[in-house]
């Protein structure tokens, strides 16, 4: 399956934001007074996702807009 880089980055950003919101509940101080191992892992992953998101947004800004015939498609299922 082929997709253009802008679409791939947009989808990835959407997925990362959704996962980050789910993880945020695991270490929310309003819900948990003390973090268990799972909460610590989720907080760490959440922080790393939020470091990655601005980098993906910057990468998206450098891509050719979707629908442009000069954009090179990316094969998702290919090796």
Image (tube, rainbow, N blue to C red):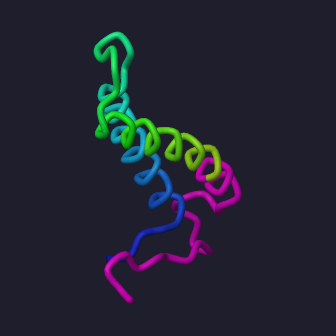
User: Looking at this view, is 71 or 15 the one in front?
Assistant: 15
Residue 50 in picture, x, y percent from top left: 54, 40
Is 78 one of the magenta-colored residues? yes
- Residue drawn at x 68%, y 50% is 58
User: Looking at this view, is 65 or 6 the one in front?
Assistant: 6
User: Looking at this view, is 14 or 73 the one in front?
Assistant: 14
Image side of residue 68 versus residue 32, left or right: right
Q: Read off the magenta span.
A: 56-79
Q: Quadrant of residue 77?
A: bottom left
Residue 79 in picture, x, y percent from top left: 38, 89
- Residue drawn at x 35%, y 10% is 30
- Residue drawn at x 49%, y 76% is 73
Is 1 one of the magenta-colored residues? no
Residue furthest top in the image: 30
Image side of residue 25 versus residue 45, left or right: left
Residue 28 in picture, x, y percent from top left: 37, 20
Residue 67's place in the image compared with 16, above or below, is below
């Amino acid at each position: 399956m082929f997709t253009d880089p802008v679409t791939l980055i947009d989808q990835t950003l959407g997925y990362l934001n959704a996962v980050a919101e789910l993880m945020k509940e695991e270490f929310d101080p309003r819900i948990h007074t003390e973090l268990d191992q799972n909460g610590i892992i989720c907080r760490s992953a959440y922080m790393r996702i939020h470091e990655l998101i601005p980098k993906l947004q910057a990468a998206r800004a450098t891509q050719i807009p979707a629908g442009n015939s000069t954009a090179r498609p990316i094969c998702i299922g290919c090796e």
